[in-house]
């Protein structure tokens, strides 16, 4: 995969996850490697808000039923 553009990758639980589905890989390409400004996790980190367990860059939370 390409170079990360996200400055929050070190503290990001999504990025640090060792198991990623194909959907996760696509989210990483869309957010971590190109448009981190649109990432809900990055926004939460910048705002000093907690990042929910299972949070994804698109704002969804794995394991949470809508």
Image: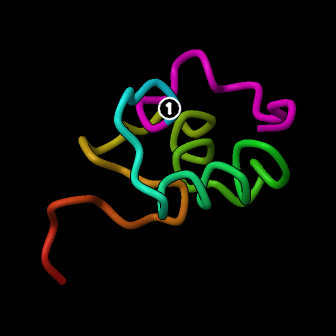
Residue at image x 71%, y 43%? 32
Quarter of the image that includes the N terminus: top right
Q: Quadrant of residue 64?
A: bottom left
Task: Please state which of residues 5 and 29 is positioned toward the viewer in this rendering.
Answer: 29
Residue at image x 75%, y 48%? 36
Looking at the image, residue 25 sits to the left or right of residue 34; the answer is left
Find out whether residue 8 is within the magenta segment: yes
- The coloring applied to the image is rainbow
Looking at the image, residue 25 sits to the left or right of residue 54; the answer is right
Residue at image x 86%, y 30%? 3
Which residue is tagged 1?
48
Residue 34 at x, y percent in the picture: 85, 51
Q: Quadrant of residue 27?
A: bottom right
Q: SS of the residue at dot 1?
A: loop
Task: Please state which of residues 30 and 65 is positioned toward the viewer in this rendering.
Answer: 30
Q: Quadrant of residue 9?
A: top right
Residue 23 at x, y percent in the picture: 48, 64
Residue at image x 61%, y 60%? 26
In the displayed structure, would residue 40 be above or below residue 13? below
Numbered range of the magenta stretch: 1-14
Residue 11 at x, y percent in the picture: 52, 19
Find out whether residue 25 is within the magenta segment: no
């Amino acid at each position: 995969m390409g170079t990360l553009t996200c400055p929050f990758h070190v503290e990001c639980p999504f990025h640090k996850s060792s198991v990623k589905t194909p959907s996760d890989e696509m989210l990483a390409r869309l957010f971590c490697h190109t448009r981190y400004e649109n990432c809900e996790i990055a926004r939460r980190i910048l705002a000093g808000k907690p990042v929910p367990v299972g949070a994804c860059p698109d704002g969804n939370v794995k394991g949470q039923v809508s």
